[in-house]
Structures are given as C-alpha cells and as structure tokens.
Amino acid sequence: MKKKLFFFAFFLILYLNFAFTQLTKLDQQELNVLKGIWQKLGLAGRREWNYDKDPCGREWDLSPYVGCDCTYNSNTTCRVTTISIIMENLSTSLPLEFTKLRYIQILSLNSNYLSGTIPPQWATMRLSMLTLNGNRLSGPFPTTLARITTLVDLYATSYFFIVIIIIREVHLRTITLLIFDYELRYLFRRNIEANHFSGSIPEEIGNLTNLMRLAMSSNDFTGPLPPTLAKLTNLIDLRISGNNFTGKIPDYISRWTRIESLILRNCLIHGSIPNFVGNLRYLESLNLNSNYLSGTIPSEWATMRLNTLSLSGNRLSGPFPTTIVRITTLVELNIEANHFSGSIPEEIGNLTNLMKLAMSSNDFTGPLPPTLAKLTNLIDLRISGNNFTGKMPDYISRWTQIESLHMLGCSFEGPIPSSISTLTELIDIRISDLKGGASTFPLLEQMTKLEVLILRNCLIHGSIPNFVGNLRNLESLDLSFNNLTGEIPSSFSQLNNAEYIILTENNLTGRLPEWVLPSNKHVSQLNGKSFVMYVLCRNNMPSCLRKDFPCTNLGALIHSLHINCGGEEVIINNTILYEADLKREGAASYYNDGNWAFSSTGNFLNDGHDAGAYILSNTSIMHNISTFEAKLYTRARTAAISLTYYGLCLMNGNYTVKLHFAEIVFTAENPYLSLGMRVFDVYVQGKLELKDFDIVKETRGTGGAVIKHFTVNVKNHTLKIQLYWAGKGITLFRYGRNYGPIISAISVDPDFKLPKKTEVGLIVGTFCGGLFIVLLIIILWRKGYLMRWAIAGGVLRATDLQTGTTFTLRQIKVATKNFAPSNKLGEGGFGAVYKGRLSDRTIIAVKQLSSQSTQGTQEFVTEIGTLSTLQHPNLVRLYGCCTEENHMSLIYEYMENNCLSHVLLGKNEVSKAKLTWPVRFEICKGIARGLAYLHEESPLRIIHRDIKASNVLLDGKFNAKISDFGLARLYDTDHSHITTRVAGTVGYLAPEYAMRGTLSPKADVYSFGIVLLEIITGKSNNYRPPSADESYYLIDWAFLMHKQRTLLELVDPDLGFEYQSQEALTTIQVALLCLDESSKLRPTMSQVVDTLEGRTTIQDMLKIRRAIKRQKSLKTQFLQDNSEICPTSVEEPTDSLDNSEICPTSVEEPTELSFVTEIPTPFSPAYIVKDWKVSSQF
C-alpha cells in the first residue's frame, strides 16, 4: 500500500510540475516589448538575452535580469515587475518602451554609458525604485521623476553600486534588492562616468512624498535646494554631495524627523551649522565635509545619537567643541582642515567608542591629554599639522588595535617612544619633524603588516636595521632628513612591493646595491654624502639627486641668475631674461641646466598623478601685478616634500635673492579648492628664513603675488634655495596632491660692482687681435689655401661627376632667398647649410663650401663622387651641385627632422619626445642597413670614416639617412689600409684607427656602436655619470652596467616604461660587440642588420666570434711551433703580404663575452665578464 501511495505522489508531482510549466508564461505583449527593448539597447544578439524561450521560465540562465510576478490569471500569466541591467556598457539613450511594461516596479540601469535625458513619458510608470547612477545622462533635473509619485527609492548619483540577489522558489520567483550605497568614486572613476544633470532641482520633486531614499550626488545641480523638499517627511537617507548648490542648510530639514543619514558633502553650502540638526533624534550619520560652514558646533547637538560626524574642510573655528565630547555614541569623528584652536580637552577620553579620530590641519596647541589613552578601540588616528607641545605620549601602546597613525608635523619632541613597538596591527605610520633629542631606529620588526612607513626628519641616527627589509608589505618607505649612517641593508632587496623608497638627506655611505633599480620598482631617492653615484635612477626620475653641485666651468662665472620656475622663457621690462624651467619630472628628480639646477624630493602619497603635475598652471586672475610681471605667474613648480634650486658658477660675493610666490591652485575661481592651505618653510644657504610660510596669508587672499627679498653671501660659487614641507597645511584637496611647496620665479642679482676691462686692456686686445689676423692671412696665402679657393671652380668643372643635375647659382639664390639667415639650417664641416624651395616646390638642403672650410675642396669633390654612385634608402640623396663663379654647393633632399644629434641630444624636449622606442629602434636598423650597403653591397666598397649622430639625418617620418661623405674612402676588401692622416671625430674613432691609422670597415662598426649607445641612453658619447672620474665616459658606463648585469639601466629614462625590453637588450648587446677593441672580433654590418631585424640572434653572433677566436688560437699554436718562421713583433700588418696571414697579430687570447637572450631578473647570473673595461680582454 505504501508503495502505491509513493508512486501516486511521485506522478502527481511530475504532473503538477508539467502543468505549471505549461500554464505559467509571460504575457505575449510584454515579451514583444522586452524584445524591442533588447534590440534598442544592443542586447538582442547575446545568448543570455535570447528570449526564444519564456524569460519567466525555469531556465534562469536565460533571463538573469528579469523578475516576474506569475500570480496573474490564477497563476497562469506572468508580468514583468523588475528589470536590472547593470554594468553592460550600454551606449544608447533610455528606451521609451519601458513605459509599455505596465506592472514594472523596479528598474535598475546603473553603471552603464546611457546618455541623453529621461523621456517625459516615463512619468506614467508606477515605479517604486529607480536607479540610474553611473551613466552619462545630462540636462536639467528630469521633472518626469517628480511625477512618478509611487517612488520610494530614487538613485541618480554617479558612484553607487547595487547588488541583486535572486531568490528562487518552487512556484514563484521573486527578486529582492539590497542597496549598498557606499560611494566608490576612486575605485570606479576609470570605469564609469558620472551623470551630468544640471540646473536647479524642480519644485515638483516635493510630490514624491513616498520617497525614503534620495541620492543625487556628483552631478552639476545648481541653485538653492527647493523648499518643496520639506514635503519628503518619509526620508531616511539623503545624499546630494558633489553639486554646486547655493545658500545655507535649509530649515525645513527639521521636518525630516525620520532621517538617519544626511550626506551634504561638497555642496558649496555656507553659513553656520543650524541648531535644529540636534533635534533629529534618529540621525546616525552626518557628513558636511568640504563646504563653507563657519562658526562652531551648537550646544544642542550634545543629545544626539550620532555614530559618524564628518565636518572636515570647512571654516569652523574656536576651541575644541565640548559639545562633541558629550556625544558618547560616536564611532567616527572627523574635524580635519578647519580653524579650531587651543588644547584638546581631557573629556575627549569619554568617547570610548571612537574607532576613527581625525583632527589634522587645525591650530591645536598644548600637550595631548592623557585621557586619550582610554580610546582603546582606535583604529585610525590623524593629528598631523598642529602645534602640539611636549613629547609623543608613551600611552600610545594602549591603542593595540590601531592600524593608521598620522603625526606629521605635530611639533612633538623626540624621540619616538619605544612603546610603539607593541602596535603590531599598524599598516600606516607617518611621523615627521620631531624636535629635541635624537634616538636610534625604533624597533618595528613585529609590524609585519606595514604598508606605509614614514619617519621623516625624526632625529634618527645610526644605521638602518636589517629588519626594515623584512617588512615585505611595504609600499612606501621614507626615512629622509635624518642622520642615518652606514650602508643600505642588503635585506632591502626583499621589498618587492615598494613603490617609493626615499632615503635622501642622510649620511649613508658606500655604493648603491645592485638591486636598487630593478625595472619593476619606482625608487625615488637614495642619495647620501658619500655615495658613489655611478648608478642612475630610472622610472620616475632621470637621475638620483646629489648633495652638492660643484661648478665645473670656472672660466665662465656668472653674476646674475633669473629662472621662471615651471614656465617658458620670458623677458621682463625688455631687459631681464628669465630662463625657461620646463623639465617635467616625477616623484624625485634632478635637472642641471648648466648655470643652475633643481632637485625634487618625495611623492604625493595616496595619489597616482603623473610627472607633469609637478608643474602647476594658473587658472586665476592675478591682481596688483603688471602685465609684464604676470608672465612669471602663469606656472609654478611644486614638490611633495622638498624643492631645491641651486645657482651654479656664481661669482663669490653678496647677492640679493628674490623669491616670487603666488598661490595659483587654491583660488576663488575654484570654490572647493579655495579652502586649501599651503604651508612650508624656506631655507636660503641653509638658513631658515621663513617658517610656516603661507602665501595666501601674505597676499591676504588668492590672486596676489608676494616677493621675498634676502641678502646672501655666495661662497664656492654655489647658491642653495630650499623649500621644505614640514607636514603643515591641508592635504585633503584634489586627491591629496596640492600641499607641498610652490614657487613661481627666482631672481639673483649682485650687490657688488662687476669687474670692468681697462681701456689699456681693450687697446692691447684690439691691437693683438688685428696683428694675429694679418699674420694668419699671410700664412694662409703662402701655404696656398687661399689660392685653392680661387681655382676650386675650375677643378670641379674639369671633373666629370655625373651628379644628375647641375644647378645655376641664380637657381640656388632664388631657392634660398639669396641665402637668407632665416633659411639657414646650421653649419657643417664645409660651411653653412640652407633650406631652399625650387620652382617645382621641391624642398632642398644646400650645403655651401666656405672659404673658411675646415675640410676643403678635396673633401667636397669626394662627397660628390661618392654620392653620385650610391643609391640607398638609408643614404641621403644628392640632387646635384653648383660650381658657378667660384661658388660651390651640393644640393640634397631636405630632411624635415634635422639630424639625430639635434633631436636626441638637443634641448628641445618636444622633439625628443617624438623619439619613442619604436622610432629609435627603426633608426638603429636604418643606420645599420646604410652601413651594410656601403661596406658590402654598393658598386664601390666604401668606409665612411665619420659615423656620428650629427651625420645621421632624419626625414619627416624619422627614417635615418647617413650623410657627409667628405671623408669617405674606397677600400680593398682583402686588406686593411694604413694612413698617416687620421680623419673623423674624437669620441667615435676606433682605437686601432686613432692610434695606428689602421683603417677597415670595422672602424665604421666601432663608430656605429657608439651611436647605438647614444640612441639607447639619450646621452652623448662624452657623457659622464655623476661622481665619475675624468676618464669615465659613456662607453665605460655601458661596460660597467654589463659587468653588473644591469644593462637595461642604460635605457633613456625619458622613455619611462614605453619600450620593448627584449629589443632594447639586444640593441645594447650589439653595441657592446661593435665596441670590441679587437677589430677582428667586431661583427660585420650585415651581421648587425640580421640580428637587429631578428633573422639571427646574439648567440649566433657569439658563435661567429668564438670561431674567429679558435682560428686565432690555432695561429698562436702555429707561432709557438714555428718560432723560427714567425717574428716576435705584434705590430699591425701593413699592405704588404708578408707572413701576417700565418702569424697572429697578438698573442693575447680575448676573454669570451657571454650574453643572455632573455631579460634577466635582478639576481640572475647574466652578463658575466671578467673585465668590463674597453680592451682586448672584452
């Protein structure tokens, strides 16, 4: 019997289930409406939006965003009641068809890219909840919403996130919406955009009397809040932050007796805080941050039951409000960035529930009360930027749960209490600018959770303990401005998460460790008085900062200096030239302009802004400043911690130093930022001249400028001006990036009489100069140099050069506008080079042979003869020549981007910025192809003899073209050539050619290697790293990086991370192979081309190299076995065929150079070499 009942029940369930599935379905009309909506939104083609089956059927994976009520018509018909489309990247307008869903109650379309306005027809819907936040909707506040009187929740803000939980039941599916309306501005600011509703909020919004939650944050609403909001007596949550409202906090808020959360942050509200707020007995969270509220906190608030009170960024003043200490329910209290003053009352210890206490950037004084020890629940304490007295309290050890402790610039006396070592939950410690007694490094080894550790200017002496390197979670480490000694601990190599390490202004010694600059780390500053600075910082800065900058040009001392800090070059009053200061750097930098330099220290914590933000632009209207002087205040340079300018090579003596300041960020034109306060110290020649300097106070408001005068004495030809942020001021605005020192211009003028030349000296100088010129003319005439110019035209006319076209002098003059100075491109070895335009509009370059040419007629003829036989995309094209009336010119194709030296090594940062890594790599390959053609493919085998950056021209697309063939020579492919006249450019000459005159194509290969290094590093061949000795140049640096396995440190910091590491590594390795002292071991240019273009690898080149070495080894063995045949001399072979093919030219066996083909890790055993110097042991 039981068995029969079981089967009966089983089949009954199956039948009912089948019947329900067949009978319950979505109304066909609503199904068609849904399909139309999906079509308009661009969702119709997605599988999850395919409604061939009933969207209210059991297959929920087909309709995860639709909720239905299936109780209609005796449970046989479903109606759509909920639609939620979240983060689907929709980019259309709001569909009108939603109005056809008569039963819809909840509509969520947040976090998409919907644009336009809300259709007025939506007013007919009977919605109870509408969420549109995180879209691009714009226009005035939609009055449509004011007519949907059934609304309970309205969210039209920009950064709220809605979580949907779907609950399935056996016979009915329902949707429950849980709203988590935390503002996620920073998390989503790159992924979603705000709505842009504007204008005033219409009075009709008062019709929504059922509203319980209203959120309209981060739009562009203006005007006062409408009085009809008073009707919304059911409100429990109001969030309207980030708009441009006007007026005061409206009195009708007192009618919202059920309100629990009131968020009016950054609404431009002014006036005092009303007393009636204290009567809102259900209010738990009140946020009035970043407004213009003044006065103090009303006593009526003492009876409130607040959990969170945020009043930061206002103009509240007076003593610490005792009203607050009576609100014992407080969990979070934030009164930062106001003007409260006086001491902290002992009653603050009554707030035992406090977990967050923020009082930074006020004017509090006196010692911290001992009752703060009672706040044992504290997780976050911020008291930076006040003027407390006494020592840091030892009772901080009682805050055992604390995670964040900010005490920057509090004026405490040191040392840091030893009890801090017990706070093992700390994640973020920021302490700076202590006074009084010094101490050793605090014991923090148990704080393994630390992510930010700032102990700046804390009077810490001794060495840095090893345990700091064991704090593996550290992201920012700042130990600057202490008296730390010794070397950087090796354990620092384990700080793999560290983005910034700042150790500047200490007395650290020794060499920088090899791990200091791995490519995955933004290391700021690691300088000390005794560091050997041969390693250059990369990533966020071009070089590590230095402690001193000795003048290296004593023969050209200057007596004045004018700098437009952060701005363009300007001339004031038609007499004074202020030099440009446009170098854009990151968290730490050093820039040397010759006569002056600057260094920047520190990063703006909690802000990922770029290097360009260290130069600020003025958006305000300056007053009381002349039109000419206003040019000095269009921009300014800033830094996070310290900004130092150095005057170099100044004559010793007394000077008047003028520092020009203007607050160009906290301006009246930007009301939100006008609440900011920038405070810093000014040191001149190491002396504190201005303490807690506030530009706005000095100028009595924004938009003004102030000039501070100082009389200083310059010794050792160096002037030092330092601006230092000591933790004061307000750091809350613009994501915390505008609080450091700022300066607009610097002028330095002498207080002494300048030395004058005597009349006797002038007469003697003139006479001697004239006599020298007369003697020089006589010598040149006797030696025939001047006669050569007279007959040069005849020589050329007698030569059959086949240049393609012979131009007349008249054509050339017309093309160059009679050699107008404005058309002059520069000076070459022959003479001036001019830009011209032919009658057919062809742009040309005219190289004119001058009578003062250092090269002469023979080189001129050589150039024509060489180029007339060569045609290659990477050789400059010769159009023709002009040899009329003793005038000699070569006419080339015009190169729009000048030469490689001008773009790469010049001072034009805009031009250099165009040399991206792909462009540089193509230039390297282009030069290689050109040389390979000259050496191995052209009808004549040619050695260029003067490969250098200035002889590589760049066309409009930055294609490289080799030029200047005046020194080119033909060569015999079987023998080297010995010459008594070495030609070329110092710094690019191969050693065998420079010392012995031995010329072969491998001399060009060596020069090419130098050019490769210049392209990679962005430095000239005579570049010397900081602290290097006088014989230490670019090539030495390159081989040192090879020895230290850090070749990628050679890459130009201007490229940042925008380069292909493997390509760069290969290019550097090719350059080093080209720079081998042994010409036989250098690769051929065809091998170079194959490697750079990826047809062969570095390892293939090394195999060829080893084969050559084996051959030389066999010859050495033959020499030892046949000593009677072979002489013992190791002189370079001459043109004659003696026994040089049998006997090796050297008995030294070169040490093998090994490379890796993959990019090494900071500790991989790559680039092993016995001796890094440029020698045959390479």
Image (cartoon, rainbow, N blue to C red):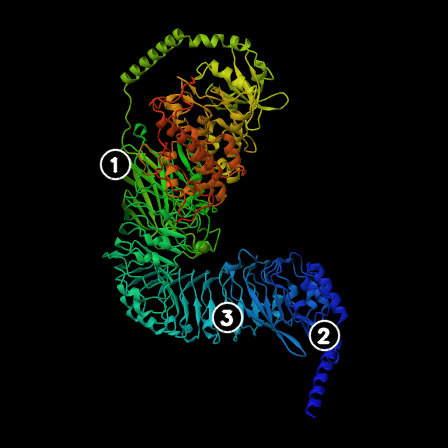
Q: Residues within 10 Å of mark 2 (few under 14, many from 20)?
A: many
Residue 1076: quarter of image: top left
Q: Which residue is mark 2?
A: 78
Image quadrant containing the C terminus: top left
Q: Nearer the viewer, mark 1 or mark 3?
A: 1
CA separation in Å, label 1 and label 2: 91 Å
Residue located farthest toward the right when viewing the structure as drawn? 28
Please state the horizontal and vertical placement of residue 644, each as a whole percent of the image: 34, 44
Q: Which of marks 3 and 1 precedes in the sequence?
A: 3
Q: Residues within 10 Å of mark 1 (few under 14, many from 20)?
A: few
- Return the x and y of residue 345 as percentages of the image width and height: 32, 69
| Labelled disc at residue 419 | none
Inter-mark Cα distance, 1 to 3: 64 Å
Residue with the mark numbered 1: 715
First in sequence, mark 2 or 3: give its number: 2
- Residue 110 sits above or below residue 811 on the image: below
In terms of depth relative to the viewer, which is nearer, 1058 or 759?
1058
Q: Along the line of sight, which residue is nearer the eye, 185 or 575?
A: 185
Residue 217 placement (x, y as % from top left) = 54, 62
Earlier-in-chain disc, 1 versus 2? 2
Q: Which residue is mark 3?
A: 261
The residue under the point 28% across, 26% down is 755
- Closer to the observer: label 1 or label 2? 2
SS for callout 3: strand
**Residue 382, relative to residue 532: is it above or below?**
below
Give the residue furthest to the bottom. 1
